[in-house]
Amino acid sequence: MTDFPLQLYTMKQSFTICFLILLFTCSCSIFKGKSLAFIDQSDPVKVMKGIFEAVNRQDFGVLVSLCAPDGKGDGDTKDICGLQESDAKTQAEFTDYFKGAKVTNSRIVGNEAQVEFLFGPNTSKKETMNLEKIDGIWYLRSY
């Protein structure tokens, strides 16, 4: 009778270890090669690099968070944020233009930023993305 609490403790410990191993194994297989979960919006360059990575992964769902909660922004930025809901042709065209894109320069003045980047089929088209910081988070405004 004196071994019962020890056996119960050992069973709880074994169960906990097995549960943690199972949880880790499942989470690794679920998230392998999947969604970015979110784009780091603490810096305008990180926002742009997040867009490029999302396009390369075909993970358009994370882009929805990049439009400002106040609804401001031009049609192009709203197209980026709504890309998950776009048809396959639009997604493919966007991917062709952004898959090799790269940031070339950035400038932050107060709560506004301009991030220059190259994109297009030959990564030769120059463009500037304008972003605005609201409550510490960078959002797309126009390009």
Image: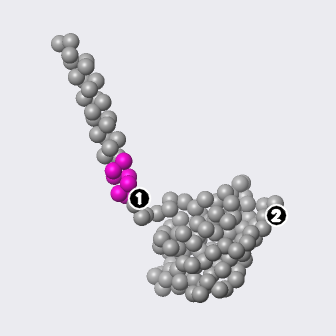
The percent position of residue 23, horizontal first and vertical second, equals 35, 46
In magenta segment, residue 25: yes
For badge 2, the amino acid type reads Val
Q: Quadrant of residue 127?
A: bottom right
Q: Residue at x 64, y 65 (%)?
A: 47
> Can residue 121 be seen by looking at this rendering?
yes
Residue bearing mark 1: 31
Give the left or right position of residue 125, taking residue 93 as reference: right
Q: Residue at x 78, y 67 (%)?
A: 107
Query: Under tag 1, what secondary structure?
Result: helix
Residue bearing mark 2: 109
Measured in 3D between alpha carbons, the distance from the residue under mark 1 to the one under mark 2, in whole angstroms, is 37 Å
Q: Residue at x 32, y 35 (%)?
A: 16
Q: Residue at x 33, y 50 (%)?
A: 25
How many numbered dots are placed on residues in this image?
2
Give the left or right position of residue 52, taking residue 42 as reference: left
The magenta span reads 24-31
Scheme of image coloration: one colour
Whichever of callouts 1 and 2 sits on the residue coming sooner in the sequence is 1
Q: Main secondary structure of the magenta part?
A: helix
Is residue 122 placed above or below 45 in the rendered structure? below
Q: Residue furthest left?
A: 1
Q: Residue furthest top?
A: 2
> Can residue 130 be seen by looking at this rendering?
no
Which disc number belongs to residue 112?
A: none
For badge 1, the amino acid type reads Phe
**Residue 67 or residue 55, whichever sits in front:** 55
Q: Contact (CB < 8 A) between labels 1 and 2?
A: no
Is residue 10 placed above or below 76 in the rendered structure? above
The percent position of residue 133, horizontal first and vertical second, equals 73, 60
Is residue 102 placed above or below 34 in the rendered structure? below
The percent position of residue 66, horizontal first and vertical second, equals 62, 65
